[in-house]
Image (tube, rainbow, N blue to C red):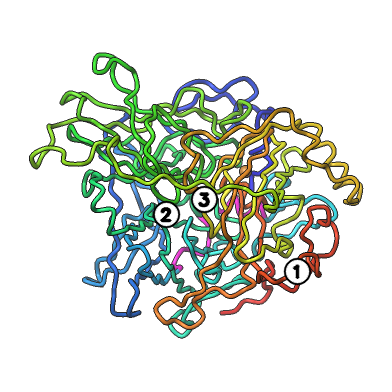
């Protein structure tokens, strides 16, 4: 949904209403919101303490050899700010093995999973949400259909409703960034509703133990030590499901980390960064049918929170869980405190784990990216503060051509309240940390390249990869164990965060393209019947040499990459191998080939509308070109349907 808005919101939108932004400035000309768009009432900043997400407690008796959890999605209430009334929210609640009457959760978001590297986790996800959506007006618009919200693909494809006519709420949980078998991956077509209706791809491990409104998934935790997260990935409505609160953290820990001397316990703080808009009564308002981005920063569920800190180093684990907003983050200090206006900090890890430490002053974080930082408050006098802010002028879809959407500056405040307790800070200074550099993945001359074109066939309309709706079967068959370079070709004027399931990758480079000429030729290919001779040859459109990745993304384990406007962004994936081992002896819990996964834009509204495609790992001895459309220029021709689960949906309820 709202894919059209995403790409084209620099143009005036319909009826213009007078408004002021709650956060900072007036919108630029042409960016006024339609009349009636809610705005958050003015809020006093830094008056609510930062909540810490609670940890779920594993039950080790259910599946020997694995940590077991039961998570239930439920509607509850949550107060986002001292001066706002409570809001209905959706969240995850973890069963408490020590006290069944005290489930773990706070209403909004979900409890944190703490796991140990290579020790598997099994989670039963249960859906007890209402059957009418919290943002039912959006569901109704998608169903209407509304040309800006309903996926309407380019020719020759027909529009298909993303969810059944009588299903207003369905859900599925994706463990973002994890090394997971497809049947536990939480793919959109695995959605299931509170009434127990199943999308066509629904799966569960151990079906005898799962009711129709439940699914049991297994996670290998064959990951580096890192911060993953879990969030809703339901077909066609992940944006409003996550917006209502369906997200949480998932840590993979390595016992070897203990020797690193990193700040831990209360000095390791996760920050779940989101933007939200509130009605005057404090309830959540979803405004992205009208504009890009929301107007108020929310961290761990509180608007403009504060955290009291000691004069010592902290490890901040930052997740951008916003639907659409990119943030350029920095730590501002009062002028009389330091000689420089920003507090320098150290980057020690990204999406998929540690990396060589890098000192920085600011960084751009796209939706779904994670940054692992060491911030040193030891030089800040007691009773002074440091403010986490968004660099002025950072647009919602930054980097790119300046767009619209409410600007946010202040986010949260660190109030330095006392000297370090417990005899001082014994954590290792960042410059002395022994973190291994991530070895570079080097492309070879024969390394296969795969093009993914961010294609919008009409302004304000659906976006697709390669002009293919998500519902079309997988046409991208990748030999098990192979290395590939993926090229995200973005002739659009927005940046998109691209997320590939299953794998970690490295950012190789970016290269500017003549976006208008590329788009024109691509249009010609699509509207001319997709003749191979019309397909644009990328090399003909470069306007400059390749640009190396930014220092904060180079030589890092990534699962989400910023694909800026009018550029091709190249990533390299070392090895496509799905996890085949069984989890806790549960039959069928390992991956089998062919194994179909997806990749998508992590602007959630774009993912829903329809910038997402399946891809399939096949046996290494599968020859290319045998009933398989693997060449981009074959896209319009019939694909081999033999391999992979077909995206599609069932028409009959399976209670
Ligand atoms: Cu996008």
Q: As rendered, which of 580 and 31 lies closer to the eye?
A: 580
Disc on the earlier residue, 2 or 1:
2
For this orientation, the residue located farthest to the left is: 423
Range covered by the magenta-colored residues: 127-142
Q: How far apart are marks 3 and 1 (CA)?
A: 28 Å
Q: How far apart are marks 2 and 1 (CA)?
A: 35 Å
Please tell me whether residue 216 is drawn above or below residue 338 in the rendered image. Answer: below
Q: Is mark 2 on a helix, strand or loop?
A: strand
Q: Which quarter holds ligand 1? A: top right
Locate residue 144, reporting x and y percent: 70, 53
Locate residue 595, reporting x and y percent: 61, 69
Q: In this view, does 113 lie to the left or right of 151?
A: left
Please tell me whether residue 466 is drawn above or below residue 95 in the rendered image. Answer: above
Residue shown at the point (29%, 41%) measured from the top left? 433
Q: Is mark 3 on a helix, strand or loop?
A: loop
Can residue 597 be seen at all in this image of the molecule? Answer: yes
């Amino acid at each position: 949904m709202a894919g059209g808005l995403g790409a084209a919101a620099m143009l005036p939108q319909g009826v213009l209403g007078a408004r002021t932004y709650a956060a900072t400035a007036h919108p630029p000309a042409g960016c006024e919101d339609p009349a009636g768009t809610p705005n958050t009432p003015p809020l006093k900043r830094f008056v609510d303490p930062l909540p810490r997400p609670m940890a779920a407690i594993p039950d080790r008796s259910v599946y020997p050899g694995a940590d077991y959890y039961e998570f239930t999605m439920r509607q509850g209430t949550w107060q986002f700010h001292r001066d706002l009334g409570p809001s209905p929210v959706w969240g995850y609640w973890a069963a408490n093995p020590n006290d069944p009457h005290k489930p773990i959760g706070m209403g909004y978001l979900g409890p944190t999973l703490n796991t140990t590297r290579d020790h598997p986790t099994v989670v039963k996800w249960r859906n007890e949400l209402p059957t009418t959506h919290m943002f039912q007006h959006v569901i109704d618009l998608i169903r209407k259909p509304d040309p800006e919200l309903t996926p309407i693909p380019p020719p020759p494809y027909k529009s298909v409703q993303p969810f059944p006519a009588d299903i207003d709420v369905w859900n599925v949980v994706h463990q973002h960034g994890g090394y997971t078998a497809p049947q536990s991956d939480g793919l959109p077509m695995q959605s299931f509703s509170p009434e127990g209706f199943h999308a066509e791809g629904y799966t569960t491990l151990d079906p005898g133990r799962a009711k129709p409104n439940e699914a049991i998934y297994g996670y290998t935790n064959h990951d580096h030590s890192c911060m993953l997260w879990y969030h809703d990935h339901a077909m066609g409505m992940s944006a409003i499901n996550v917006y209502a609160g369906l997200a949480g953290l998932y840590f993979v820990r390595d016992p070897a980390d203990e020797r690193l001397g990193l700040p831990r316990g209360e000095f390791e703080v996760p920050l779940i960064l989101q933007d939200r808009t509130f009605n005057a009564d404090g309830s959540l308002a979803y405004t992205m049918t009208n504009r890009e981005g929301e107007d108020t920063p929310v961290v761990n569920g509180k608007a403009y929170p504060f955290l009291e800190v000691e004069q010592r180093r902290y490890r901040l684990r930052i997740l951008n869980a916003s639907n659409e907003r990119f943030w350029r983050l920095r730590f501002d200090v009062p002028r009389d405190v330091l000689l420089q206006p920003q507090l320098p900090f150290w980057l020690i890890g990204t999406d998929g784990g540690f990396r060589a430490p890098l000192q920085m002053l600011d960084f751009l974080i796209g939706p779904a990216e994670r940054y692992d930082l060491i911030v040193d408050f030891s030089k800040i006098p007691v009773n002074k503060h440091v403010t986490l802010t968004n660099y002025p002028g950072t647009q919602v879809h930054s980097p790119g051509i300046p767009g619209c959407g409410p600007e946010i500056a202040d986010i949260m405040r660190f109030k330095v309240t006392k000297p370090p307790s417990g005899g001082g800070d014994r954590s290792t200074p960042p410059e002395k940390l022994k973190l291994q550099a991530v070895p570079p993945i080097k492309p070879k001359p024969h390394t296969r390249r795969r093009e993914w074109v961010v294609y919008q066939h009409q302004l304000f309309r659906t976006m697709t990869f390669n002009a293919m709706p998500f519902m079309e079967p997988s046409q991208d068959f990748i030999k098990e164990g192979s290395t590939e370079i993926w090229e995200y070709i973005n002739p659009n004027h927005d940046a998109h965060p691209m997320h590939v399931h299953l794998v970690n990758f490295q950012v190789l480079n970016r290269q500017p393209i003549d976006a208008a000429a590329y788009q024109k030729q691509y249009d010609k290919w699509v509207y001319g019947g997709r003749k191979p001779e019309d397909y644009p040859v990328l090399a003909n459109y470069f306007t400059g040499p390749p640009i190396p990745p930014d220092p904060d993304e180079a030589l890092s384990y990534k699962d989400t990459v910023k694909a800026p406007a009018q550029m091709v962004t190249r990533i390299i994936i070392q090895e496509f191998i799905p996890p085949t081992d069984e989890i806790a002896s549960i039959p069928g819990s390992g991956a089998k080939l062919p194994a179909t996964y997806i990749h998508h834009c992590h602007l959630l509204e774009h993912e829903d509308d329809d910038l997402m495609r399946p891809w399939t790992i096949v046996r290494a001895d599968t020859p290319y070109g045998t009933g398989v459309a693997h060449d981009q220029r074959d896209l319009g021709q019939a694909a081999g349907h033999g391999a992979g689960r077909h995206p599609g949906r069932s028409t009959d309820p399976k209670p």
